[in-house]
Amino acid sequence: MTAEKETRCLLLQTAQRLLGHQPSAQEETRWRLLQAATEVFAEVGYHAATTREICKRAEVNLASIHYYFGDKAELYREVFRLPFLNECNTFATLDIAQVSLEVALQSFYGWLFPPTVEEDPMRQLFMRLHAREDAEPSGVLGDAMVQAFRPNHEKMQALLCREFGLQKPDADLDRLTFGVIGLATFYFHNRMALDYFAPNLISGQKARETMTERLVGYAVALIEAERKRRATAAGADK
């Protein structure tokens, strides 16, 4: 089996797990389009990608993109939402009432820095796609990424609210949420700087495992610093 066919099968396996049943002919066509689009966009970028090539690779007729997604731009946005599906994004589905702070943080950072990415063709495609979008912005993503990341942001807020006994986030908890998340997202939104200054920092399984471990430690330190600040402020108010 070719690498391309293996990758396509992986995405269809994901579809089957998400759907809970063997994909119907229509569902399979939609997922084949997503797979083909991911490949083509990663290879040549949004503007150079043609709907004809995507449909050819997906082995469907040219009208399929319009039928399932409306246009190329929406197909592109949908491809960027794929890594945030519950099947891929275990952090968003955590029951935070049942896990420790460290386990929750490990889940979040481990999702962003999967140790076995070299063995996962889909992860490799997504990484190539993000790198290309950073280098050659398509101008069509809009707030698609923000909306896709929203469950993770809200889950992190809920986790931190639990840690501080808050019913809802206050301004300082919002600051802390962005700080904890930003520890990791920098590496994706500033990939050119990372490749220039420290190209091997997240290269290889051991490097990513170390990165996840360090980020958990850094995040815990930030959270403890905020805990101490709140305790000091509460004591001063008495």
Image: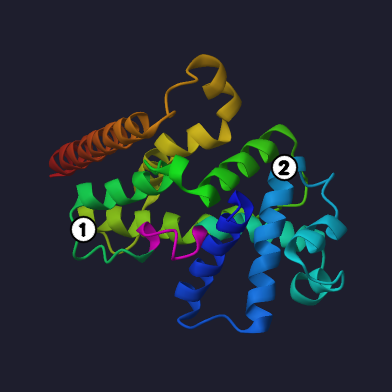
Q: Seen from this angle, which residue lies furthest top?
A: 197
Residue at the spot 52% in from the left edge and 61% down from the top edge = 10
**164 and 132: which is toward the camera:** 132
Q: Residue 8, position in %: x, y?
A: 60, 60
Q: Residue 5, position in %: x, y?
A: 61, 58
Image depth: mark 2 or mark 1 in front = 2
**116 and 202: which is toward the camera:** 116
**53 and 34: which is toward the camera:** 53
Residue under circle 1?
165
Residue 230 marker: none
User: Magenta: predominant secondary structure element?
Assistant: loop
Q: Which of the two discs, 2 and 1, labels the residue nearer the N terminus?
A: 2
Which region is colored magenta?
84-92
**Is 67 on the left or on the right of 207, as rendered?**
right
- Residue type of the residue flagged with mark 2: Glu
Residue under circle 2?
43
Label 2: state its secondary structure: helix
- Residue type of the residue flagged with mark 1: Gly
Residue at the spot 29% in from the left edge and 47% down from the top edge = 105
Q: Is residue 87 magenta?
A: yes
